[in-house]
């Protein structure tokens, strides 16, 4: 449905159809023999006897399934009824890890409205609930950890963002938790990866209050809500404005308003300090479209949307909790408190009779988490490449192809990435000591003809074992130019390297000489630092590391490169949020290393001691066919350092057992979200 058609549907203001729903069975129906004490309450048969409105929702479970209208439905693991000392409740329960719905990182047992409505019409939702459990594991520095969303407004159109999420969050060891609500911007433009939330405290803290380290928590909120303590929310939309009311016995009533059709965040300068501190450091620093959620269909959601998950915090420091998931075993998670559980005793919704079917949202999202999204669907240039993977497998046609151990896609909480993963020891190419899951361009070109490769990536893992004296240890190559002729040397290798125990790693690029003569054994690399150190900065002993680079790049921190070869000159550009942009040039068709006296001091220090002290042919790589490579080319291997103190890392390989290497951090993993390949262009 187009914007114009959708807008015309909602332009009038008809009488409201009340779908109002009384959650408690009438007191008279609960009396037996003229009494109404707790012992005489009749046990209800299903959730719809307590809250008779399930015909207006689809129910999504913690296993990712959409079970439809739960009028006569229960599930012992996710959705059922319970009785406390006084009343009957509907229970929504979901683990830290199950199967998710749509593109979310998080499991839910949650109702989603069957109809969507315009923010310019009237809509209302009420609920009274108590949170009975939130996950007790996770990283305290991650804002979403130990929390659950108990009510939402969700967009069914555009980016499908969320103008309202009502949270409950409690840190382990605290008696009281916080209730807060978040507004997520409806991001301007087509790229939704920079979206962010602004959080408002109700009782206790807002979303941005986090721990100082993984297991250190802030002070307990004085005005918080305990597990098992009931509270009520009311959400009312009128003329494009959202009105919120929160009540709880013994707590101050809180009210808020938020305009849903006119944004206050249309410029970078409008970004709140809370967002600058929480989201901007991970690159989520977008602006909102001027009319916010106007002309989009919205719908209510209600239940237990568990915000604690098992994904690694380095993937996303706001949404990925690193919590215990027991490999997805739901019963084990339930047994040791790694789940969210919310009980509702009453609720109601009212929507306009102009509301229309929300079937499009369910068609787009049902089963999406189980659907295979192939790498070529994320980065469309895969038809121009073939791949060599960490087990030695070559694949020429990468359309409709993935491999769960080496080459696949993931979602990091904001967008989808292509993953390249490879162990310290597997099967390598004929001239290499190192495994790779790496693309190789099918087209070949001379430096004079030129070519261009771009990539936006983040390194998620480098090997945690190796010898610190070996320059290649703890590193991976994420982009290359490779010669297909002559010595088959490499005029460009883009590295990421991080020593164990360091938070920040280095990005640098190497130029390998195209050795003069027939003997290529004297070849060497010259390394240039981008951010952090160059390749020559090594440890003084096997486990003695140099100082951490001040301007380095962390694991999980995105950076971009552009390699543009034009008329024999290589132009390099490196960019990363909050880092200085770096540019370099290198002549690929005229050497500066034709004499022994031309060897740089770095090379004399690093390569000459092991006998690699060659000179380069005067025309360097001129006339030789080259091609681009991109992915994860693991530079850490298990070969003895005494063999070669630059390239033989002496790392753990578990006898080549790939699963054990992955389990113990002896691998490299690189994610790309954007990349292009094509002809070289005149430099700017």
Image (cartoon, rainbow, N blue to C red):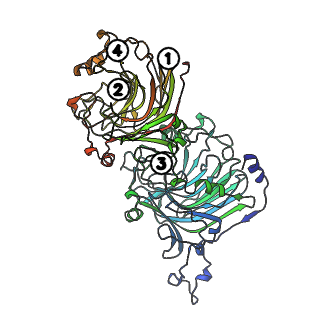
Alpha carbon distance from label 4 to label 2: 25 Å
SS for dot 2: loop
Which one is closest to the eye, mark 1 or mark 2?
A: 1
Q: Is residue 140 visible?
A: yes
Task: Please determine whether, in this image, residue 43 is positioned above or below residue 460.
Answer: below
CA–CA distance between discs 4 and 1?
Answer: 18 Å
Mark 4 residue crowding within 10 angstroms, few (<14) / some (14–19) / many (20+): many
For the residues marked 2 and 3, what is the alpha-carbon distance in whole angstroms? Answer: 31 Å
Task: Determine which quarter of the picture holds residue 661.
Answer: top left
Place of residue 54 in the rendered image (x, y in percent of width and height, measured from the top left): 62, 68
Quarter of the image for the C terminus: give it: top right
Q: Which residue does the image show at 48% across and 41% down from the upper left? A: 418
| Of pointers 4 and 1, the one earlier in the residue sequence | 1
Q: Horizontal and vertical percent for residue 370?
A: 51, 55
Look at the numbered discs 4 and 2 and tell me whether their residues touch, using CB distance below 8 Å.
no
Mark seen at residue 448: 1
Mark 2 or mark 3, whichever is nearer to me: 2
Looking at the image, is mark 3 or mark 1 earlier in the sequence? 3
Judging by the rendered image, the residue that carries numbered circle 4 is: 616
The residue to which callout 2 is attached is 533
Q: Where on the picture, by quarter, is residue 643?
A: top left
Element assignment for label 3: loop
Nearer the observer, 664 or 504:
664
Instruction: Answer with the quarter of the image where residue 496 lies.
Output: top left
Q: Secondary structure at mark 4?
A: loop
């Amino acid at each position: 449905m187009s914007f114009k058609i959708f807008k015309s549907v909602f332009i009038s203001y008809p009488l409201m159809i009340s779908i109002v729903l009384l959650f408690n069975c009438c007191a008279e129906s609960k009396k037996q023999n003229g009494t109404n004490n707790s012992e005489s309450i009749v046990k209800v048969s299903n959730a719809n006897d307590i809250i008779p409105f399930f015909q207006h929702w689809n129910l999504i479970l913690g296993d990712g399934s959409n079970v439809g209208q739960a009028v006569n439905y229960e599930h012992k693991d996710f959705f059922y009824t319970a009785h406390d000392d006084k009343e009957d409740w509907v229970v929504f329960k979901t683990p830290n890890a199950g199967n998710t719905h749509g593109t979310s990182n998080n499991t839910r047992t949650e109702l989603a409205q069957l109809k969507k409505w315009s923010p310019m019409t009237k809509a209302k939702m009420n609920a009274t609930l108590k949170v009975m459990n939130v996950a007790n594991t996770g990283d305290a520095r991650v804002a979403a950890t130990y929390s659950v969303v108990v009510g939402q407004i969700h967009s069914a159109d555009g980016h499908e963002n969320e103008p309202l999420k009502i949270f409950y969050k409690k840190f382990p060891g605290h008696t009281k938790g916080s209730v807060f609500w978040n507004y997520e911007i409806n991001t301007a433009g087509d790229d939704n990866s920079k979206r962010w939330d602004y959080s408002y405290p109700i009782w206790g803290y807002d979303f941005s209050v986090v721990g100082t380290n993984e297991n250190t928590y802030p002070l307990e909120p004085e005005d918080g809500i305990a597990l098992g303590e009931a509270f009520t929310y009311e959400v009312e939309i009128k003329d494009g404005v959202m009105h919120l009311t929160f009540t709880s016995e013994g707590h101050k009533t809180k009210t808020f308003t938020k305009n849903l059709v006119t944004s206050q965040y249309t410029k970078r300068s409008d970004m709140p300090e809370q967002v600058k501190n929480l989201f901007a450091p991970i690159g989520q620093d977008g602006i909102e479209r001027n009319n916010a959620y106007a002309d989009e269909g919205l719908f209510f959601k209600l239940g237990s949307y568990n915000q604690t998950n098992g994904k690694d915090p380095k993937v996303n420091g706001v949404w990925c909790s690193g919590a215990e998931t027991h490999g997805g075993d739901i019963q084990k998670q339930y047994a040791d408190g790694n789940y969210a559980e919310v009980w509702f005793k009453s609720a109601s919704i009212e929507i306009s009779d102009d509301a229309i079917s929300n079937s499009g949202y369910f068609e787009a999202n049902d089963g999406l988490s189980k659907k295979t999204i192939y790498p070529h669907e994320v980065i469309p240039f895969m038809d121009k490449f073939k791949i060599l993977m960490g087990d030695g497998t070559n694949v020429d046609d990468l359309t409709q192809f993935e491999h769960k151990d080496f080459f696949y896609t993931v979602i990091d909480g904001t967008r989808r990435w292509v993953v390249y993963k490879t162990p310290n020891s597997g099967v390598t190419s004929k001239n290499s000591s190192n495994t790779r899951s790496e693309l190789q361009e099918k087209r070949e070109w001379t430096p004079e003809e030129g070519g261009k490769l771009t990539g936006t990536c983040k390194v998620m893992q480098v090997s945690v074992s190796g010898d610190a004296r070996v320059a290649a240890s703890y590193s991976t190559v994420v982009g290359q130019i490779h010669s297909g002729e002559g010595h088959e040397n490499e005029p460009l290798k883009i590295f990421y390297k991080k020593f164990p125990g360091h938070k920040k790693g280095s990005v640098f690029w190497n130029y390998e000489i195209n050795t003069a003569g027939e003997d290529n054994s004297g070849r060497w690399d010259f390394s240039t630092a981008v951010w952090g150190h160059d390749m020559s900065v090594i440890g003084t002993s096997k486990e003695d590391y140099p100082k951490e680079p001040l301007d380095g790049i962390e694991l999980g921190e995105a950076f971009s490169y552009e390699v543009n070869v034009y008329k024999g000159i290589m132009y390099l550009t490196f960019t990363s949020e909050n880092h200085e942009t770096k540019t370099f040039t290198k002549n690929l068709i005229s050497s500066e290393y034709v004499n022994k006296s031309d060897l740089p001091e770095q090379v004399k220090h690093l390569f000459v001691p092991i006998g690699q002290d060659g000179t380069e042919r005067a025309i360097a790589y001129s006339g030789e066919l080259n091609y681009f490579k991109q992915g994860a080319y693991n530079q850490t291997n298990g070969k003895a350092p005494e063999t070669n103190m630059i390239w033989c890392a002496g790392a753990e390989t578990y006898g080549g057992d790939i699963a054990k290497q992955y389990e113990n951090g002896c691998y490299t993993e690189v994610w790309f979200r954007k990349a292009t390949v094509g002809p070289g262009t005149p430099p700017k």
